[in-house]
Image (tube, rainbow, N blue to C red):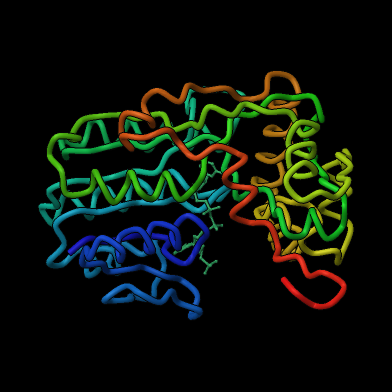
Amino acid sequence: MILLTSANGKTGRHMMKAMVAKGLPLRAICRSSAGPLGAQEVLYGDQLDKAFLGRAMEGVKAVIHIGPPMHPHESAMGQFVIDAARENGIEHFVYISVLHPQIEALLNHQAKLRVENALIQSRLPFTILQPTHYMQNIDVASVVASGVLTSPFALSSRLSFVDMEDVAEVAAKVVLQPDHWFATYPLCSEDCLTTHEVAEAISTHSGRPIEARYISLEQILDTPGTEGSVGDQTLDKLRRHRGEVPDYSIDALRRLVACYNSYGIRGNPNVLRWLLNRDPTNITAFIRRHLPPFRSEDGQQ
Ligand SMILES: NC(=O)c1ccc[n+]([C@@H]2O[C@H](COP(=O)([O-])OP(=O)(O)OC[C@H]3O[C@@H](n4cnc5c(N)ncnc54)[C@H](OP(=O)(O)O)[C@@H]3O)[C@@H](O)[C@H]2O)c1
């Protein structure tokens, strides 16, 4: 049995789809009741609850741990999941981290670095996956519908992208394979693009003009409604729950924006190419996969 944490989130759902496609036995942990479909077993609980984590580990061979993004207790949660895995004699621990967790200015990267450290010193066989910025942060259908790609990052900052489906494919590939024990894999496609270039690519493939438009983080967080227009689902989610978002999360976001504005984030696709045994999905394929079906004037698709 494989245990997947944060299964109801965006990454979790992609992981689950990839595991189910491979016929891997899966137990999914969800907090909210809108649980995912597909896992053989679904457990509802809080990943900060040690007793719950202990029960969730029973009969489990490998764990895939995803921490909730920008969460004030992300490191503690990672430590608790590692402790429960150790206590239950888990064979392999796969941790979904982030590209370049050593960036000191970023709270969310530092949280993941602490979990990586704890894992390396846990004596558990581990595989650390370090995805860069997800392509799925771009809501292609809504961008095409509005004609605008908004971003809180400087429009000329370069970001390496990766397709979450590729990340999930890798997780499903490594989770039961001792060949991948004690390894850390940065995961990037070959695309390292500015927002202008992403807008241009969406325009090319949709045949519609797309404007790249800067929107400040404060505007995003303070402007109600217009769900989907921002093109980053994490930001959209934070905006919808603005009143409940902890100061830590806002601080983490402000630092992320400042860091991306100054430096962007860049990685190398070689490791992902080797793991997939093919070229990583590029932004063109991603955009084409997510284009809305167009209807002609006579209603044909
Ligand atoms: N976005 C990117 O470009 C990117 C790139 C690289 C790495 N990452 C990392 O990938 C990870 C996953 O991100 P994501 O965007 O997939 O996250 P997400 O969609 O926000 O999902 C997070 C999940 O965690 C669950 N959760 C939160 N607190 C919990 C708790 N106390 N107990 C149990 N479950 C809890 C949430 O449950 P509910 O649904 O019930 O709230 C949610 O389903 C993050 O660590 C992020 O930093 C993201």
**Direction top: furthest residue:** 263
Q: Is residue 10 left or right of residue 272?
A: right
Residue shown at 39% from the left, 50% from the top: 168
Quarter assignment of residue 261 = top right
- Write the residue at 80% across / 55% down: 144
Give the camera-side residue of 197 and 115. Answer: 197
Residue 277 vs 37, above or below: the answer is above
Q: Position of residue 287 (x, y in %)?
A: 64, 48
Quadrant for residue 142, please give it.
bottom right
Position of the C terminus by quadrant: bottom right
Q: Is residue 117 above or below residue 199?
A: above
The residue lying furthest to the bottom in this view is: 33
Which quadrant is home to the N terminus? bottom left
Q: Nearer the viewer, residue 6 or 296?
A: 296
When the figure is inspected, residue 224 is found, relative to residue 261, above or below; the finding is below
Note whether 69 is above or below 278 in the view shown: below
The one nearer the camera, 269 or 113, is 269
What's the residue at 86%, 67% (across, down)? 225
